[in-house]
Amino acid sequence: MCKHILLYFLGGNVAVANDKVKRYVNPLLKYCAAKIRSKHDRLDIVQDVLYDYIKVDIIFFDEKHEKNWLYKVCDNKIADYLREKYKRNDFEIPEELVAKKITTSDELQHEMIFLLEKISKLPENQEQAIKMYYLEDYTTEEIAEYLKVTQETVWNLLSKARESLR
């Protein structure tokens, strides 16, 4: 998938495209995996990063400069993805829960659906904090940075949200 874009922009130079893909795809995918669970979304982000890499007309001083640029672009793409995801109120149920859902009783499935409905009725900032902390495994520091609040505020939001869910 990424290789096709590179081939297009490199004028069909297969050797150069293969070198770029081999050198950067796996490290960028691993980097994205720390923040994004969906494999397909990670692939899309890396593909966009490589597209920007080929499209932009920058002369890199050395390999370190090139890597730093790629990781910074990747950070920006991840931030854009997460921002858009939370604007749509779209979130993923962790794979562990999806796997359990198939093998568990109807009662547990009903409770999970009920809990997700209650979460969606919380005030927006509490809902985002709960989703990011429990469903996306973000730290309170990361949540504070994303929501542009202090870490203490995140703790308060989580506490109020847990109290509301009881």
Image: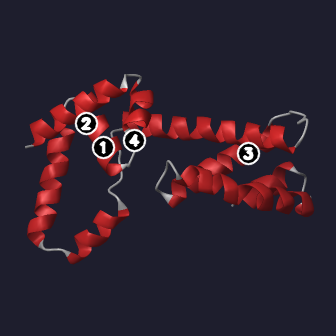
| Residue at screen point 81% across, 35% down | 56
Residue position for label 4: 139
In terms of sequence position, does the residue under pointer 3 or pointer 2 come before the other? 3
* Tag 2 secondary structure: helix
In terms of sequence position, does the residue under pointer 4 or pointer 1 come before the other? 1
Tags 3 and 4 in contact by the CB under 8 Å rule? Answer: no
* Tag 1 secondary structure: helix
Badge 1 density bin: few <14, some 14–19, many ≥20, Cα 10 Å: many
Tags 3 and 1 in contact by the CB under 8 Å rule? Answer: no
Q: Nearer the viewer, residue 53 or 37?
A: 37
Residue position for label 2: 127
Q: Nearer the viewer, residue 2 or 161?
A: 161
| Residue at screen point 49% across, 50% down | 36
How far apart marks 3 and 1 lie (CA) works out to 31 Å
Amino acid type assigned to the residue bearing label 3 in the image: Tyr
Question: Where does residue 114 sit, x and y in percent of width and height?
Answer: 12, 52
Instruction: Indicate the quadrant containing the N terminus: top left, top right, bottom left or bottom right.
Output: bottom right
Residue position for label 3: 51
Question: Where does residue 164 sit, x and y in percent of width and height?
Answer: 10, 36
How far apart marks 4 and 1 lie (CA) works out to 11 Å
